[in-house]
Amino acid sequence: MSWTANSCLVTLAILFLWRVEEIAEACSCAPVHPQQAYCSSDVVIRAKVVGEEKVDVGNDIYGNPIKSLKYEIKQIKMFKGPTQDIDAIYTAPISSLCGATLESNGKEYLIAGKIEADGKMHITLCDFIEPWEAMSATQKKSLTQRYEMGCGCKISPCISIPCMISSPAECLWTDLVIEKKVSGAQAKHFACIKRSDDSCAWYRGAALPKQDFLDIQDP
C-alpha cells in the first residue's frame, strides 16, 4: 500500500475517532429534582421490563432506516398519564444519542417520560428513571399526594454559592452544593408545595402539608 493510501487511512481513522468522541459527548442532562420530573412529564409509571428489541421507526432524509430500542413493559401502577395502560417504551438505541438503558431481570422502575406525536411513550437519559427499591418512602408517597400540589412552584437548583430565589413561588434546591449530588436530602425527603398565599416552601414528608411547612432557607 502506498504512503498516500496509508495517509488517507490515518486521516479517515482520526476523523472517525473525532466523530465518535463528538457523538459520545452529544448527550448531556441538567440536574432535575424528582418533583420537577413528575410535573414536566406526560407519563409517570411504575413498571418492569419483560422484553426488548430494536425496531425501525422511519427513515432519515437519505432514506436510511432509523432504529429505536423498544422495551416491552408490564405496568404496575400509573401515577400520571393517559387512561390506557402503557405496554411499551421507546428510546434511542445508544447512550450517546441519549438512549436509556433498562434491565429486564425483574427490576422495577419509576419511569417518567413523554408521549410523542406517534402516540407512544418515549424516554431519554435525561428523564427521571429510578429503580423502585432505590426510592425513598417520601418520594413514593409524593407521587400520589404531594408532587402534584407543587407543580405551580419552581424548583431552582443552586449550582454554586451564593444563590437565591427570585420569586416567593420558588424553592431553592441546594443538594448540589451541600451534598455534591443530585439525590440528596431535598430530592429524597422534601417536596416544594404551594401555600394558600401562593408562595412555595419545602415540605418534609413526615407530616401533612398543612401542618408542617419549612422556611424556604431551611431545607
Image: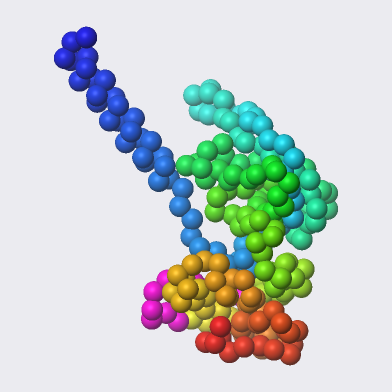
The foreground one among 188 and 215 is 188
36 lies above or below 204: above
Classify residue 91 by image quadrant. Answer: top right
* Residue 85: x %, y % from top left: 81, 48
- Pick out the residue farthest to the top: 1
Describe residue 118's horizontal placement relative to residue 178 as left or right: right
For the C terminus, the quadrant is bottom right
Name the residue: 63% across, 57% down.
130
Of 7 and 153, nearer the camera is 7
Q: Main secondary structure of the magenta part?
A: loop
Left or right of residue 183: residue 144: right
For residue 94, side relative to residue 142 (left or right): left
Q: Is residue 36 magenta?
A: no
Answer yes or no: is residue 210 visible: yes
Magenta segment boundaries in residue numbering:
153-164
User: Which colour style is shown?
Assistant: rainbow
| Numbered marks: total | 0
Q: Residue at x 77, y 68 (%)?
A: 144
158 inside magenta stretch = yes
> What quarter of the picture does the N terminus occupy?
top left
> Relative to residue 142, is residue 103 depicted above or below?
above
